Image: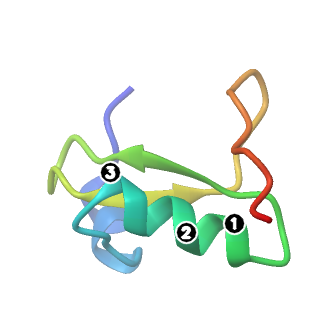
Amino acid sequence: MRTRLSICRKKRRFASETDAIATAQAAAITLRPYRCDRCHLYHLTGRTRGKRRLPVAG
């Protein structure tokens, strides 16, 4: 499924997956990064059903 352009424009963009993962691990809620098929950068999503979880930072 393709990301809607209006959604892409509203989300924060990360240049690297490493930056997105670091932000996701620091968040108070469970987030995961994904590569956007519109801007080709990384965004974060709260949709984690059926997806791999990030390792716990520590």
* Closer mark to the observer between disc 2 and disc 3: 2
Query: Which of the 4 image quadrants contains residue 31?
Result: bottom right
Instruction: Tell which residue pokes out farthest to the front in this image.
Output: 58
Residue 47, picture quadrant: top right
Residue designated by label 2: 22
Residue 41 coordinates in the image, percent (x, y)? 22, 57
Question: Label 1 vs label 3: CA separation?
Answer: 25 Å
Percent x, y of residue 44: 52, 60
50 relative to 55, above or below: above
As shown in the figure, which amino acid type bears the numbered disc 2? Ala
Looking at the rendered structure, the kind of residue marked 1 is Gln
Mark number displayed over residue 25: 1
Query: Label 3 belongs to which residue?
Result: 4
Q: Residues within 10 Å of mark 2 (few under 14, many from 20)?
A: few
The number of numbered badges drawn on the structure is: 3
The disc, 2 or 3, on the residue closer to the chain's N-terminal end is: 3
